[in-house]
Structure formats: C-alpha cells, structure tokens
Image: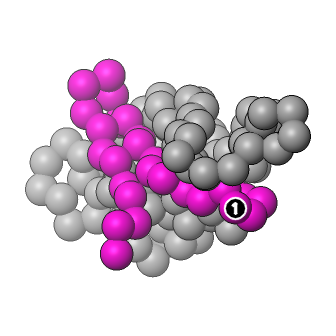
Amino acid sequence: MYTIFIESRFSAAHRLVGYEGHCGRVHGHTWKVRIEVKTDQIDEIGISIDFKDLRSLTDSALSKLDHQNINEIPPFDKINPTAENLSRHLFEEIGRGLPKPVQMASVTVWESENHAVTYTDES
C-alpha cells in the first residue's frame, strides 16, 4: 500500500457556536491541512497519483474557505466549524474527486502549531 500526502495552508475566520470562552467569538487562524491518500496500484511509470492532481483537488476545496468567515460557508452555516468538522468535510469533498483506485486515507487540520485533528473513515 502506498500513502501519498501533501500539505497546504489557508487563512480564515470562524467562531464556535455554543462555546463558552474566547473561541465563541469570531477569530482567525492560518490553518494547516495535510491530505493523505492511499492506493495499492501504480501506473506504468511508477506513479500512484500525480502530486499536481492531488494539489489541484486540495486547492479547489480550500479556495472555498480561504479568507472567508467559515460560519457563512455551507455546510458550516448549519454545523459548527470545528477542526473536527472541517477535517471530515475536506475528507469527503476531496475524496469525491479522486481517481480509482486512489482512496482517502486521512485529513489532518491544524488550528495552530500545537493543536490538530485527524479524520479517517475506518468504518
């Protein structure tokens, strides 16, 4: 099995609805994101997925969030924009664009250098 990953960043604001404390107010982060995919196949030249293609899928998903108030962007206008919910959302959105037989492995979202959440679908 091959695991391929890229990392990226975007800047955006959010607030945690129902949170008692500073994070209940609008505040911003420079979010770091790690996208990991997996496959057991490589093509005739030895590539599983072109890094450019994975970067393009990731950039497309992140561009919808970059320099936005995430609370105003679907689905986060209905669900809390926590790092947990962001990681699952990105896992699902990027996963829809992957070519067969490449599958999502995990998405890690950092709110800061020391705080991150990883989502995997191990159901």
In x, y percent, where is residue 24?
24, 53
In x, y percent, where is residue 70?
51, 55
Return the residue found at the far right.
Answer: 44
Name which residue type carries label 1: Pro
- Residue at 74% x, 64% y is 100
In x, y percent, where is residue 101?
70, 61
Residue 46 visible within the image: yes
Q: Residues within 10 Å of mark 1 (few under 14, many from 20)?
A: few
Using residue 20 as the reference point, say whether residue 68 is left or right of it.
right
Residue under label 1, please give it. 101
Return the residue found at the far left.
Answer: 20
- Residue at 18% x, 59% y is 19
Report if residue 116 lies within the magenta region.
yes
- Residue at 34% x, 75% y is 123
Residue 10 visible within the image: no
Closest to the observer, 47 or 32: 47
Closest to the observer, 87 or 120: 120
Closest to the observer, 102 or 74: 102
